[in-house]
Amino acid sequence: MQLLVTLIAVVLVALVLLSLVLSGPVATAVGKQIGLGSIPVTVWNIAKWPVMLAVIVFIVALLYYATPNIKQPKFRWISVGAIVAIVVWIVISALFGFYVANFSSYNKTYGSFAAVIVFLLWLWITNLALLFGAELDSELERGRELQAGVKAEEKVQLPPRDTKVSDKLAEKEKEDVARGRRLRETAGETQKVEED
């Protein structure tokens, strides 16, 4: 499921990036090659922004629904955390772009790898914004559960979607504890034999 979510997200992000590139003079040149006039190009330049925002909202909703290992009550197109994440992401991306364009010296430091470094930093900032929104949604859900009388003081009380990995880790931890106990008990007996 995670691979499918990743594939869908990558394809949608690629479409958003393509629509960002396909604007201004590039959109005019493509419009002339296809045989479109200036009106469809102008409509494209205006209409692409709400469409891109809708695609980004869908990507965030998909990530918030499918990636946590909990059974979500329902698929929500928009949530408080998603709105906050998108707004924070847009603002931070604009500020980061302004910083890179005016104050940074990545080219001097990293040379031809500067674009890769800047892109990775931007991805990290994007991930922080998305995690902040997810955490906000989680805390709001925990608050709703507490108000409903559910014991959610420590964590959200939604059932897990899949417990195979957590069960396997718990079994491994039991085996490690048993192995440590045997080692301790064996070492104690060996020590008594040496004293006699």
Image (cartoon, helix red, strand yellow):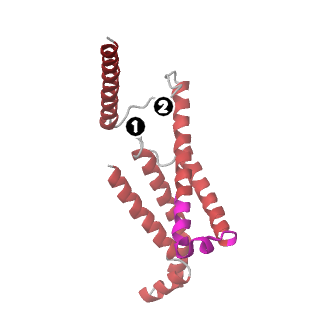
Residue at the far right: name it: 103
User: Considering the image in quadrants, where does the C terminus appear?
Assistant: top left
Q: At 55% across and 51% down in the image, what residue appears?
A: 128
Marks 2 and 1: CB-CB under 8 Å? Answer: yes
Mark toward the start of the polypeptide (2 vs 1): 1
Percent coordinates x, y for residue 65 in the rendering: 42, 45
Q: Which residues are magenta?
A: 102-123
The outermost residue toward the top is 196
- Tell me, yes or no, whether the highlighted magenta stretch contains residue 155: no
Determine whether 58 is above or below 167 in the image: below
Residue depicted at 50% across the width and 75% down the height: 21
Labelled disc at residue 13? none
x and y percentages locating residue 85 in the rendered image? 56, 51
Q: Is residue 147 left or right of residue 76?
A: right
In what element is the residue under mark 2? Answer: loop
Most common secondary structure along the magenta stretch: helix
Q: Dot 2: few (<14), some (14–19), or many (≥20) neighbours within 10 Å?
A: some
Q: 52 or 177: which is nearer to us?
A: 177
Q: How many badges with numbers are in the image?
A: 2
* The quarter of the displayed image where residue 143 is located: top right
Eyeballing the image, is 172 above or below 102?
Answer: above
Q: Quadrant of residue 195?
A: top left
Residue toward you, 166 or 187:
187
Q: To which residue does mark 1 refer?
A: 70
> Which residue is nearer to you in this view: 103 or 4?
103
Q: Where is residue 180 drawn, in percent x and y? A: 34, 25
Q: Nearer the viewer, residue 18 or 106?
A: 106
Give how far across and how far down residue 48 sits, in percent. Answer: 51, 69
Which label number is shown at residue 156?
2
Q: Residue at x 52, y 21 (%)?
A: 149
Q: CA distance from mark 2 to mark 1?
A: 10 Å
Amino acid type indicated by mark 2: Val
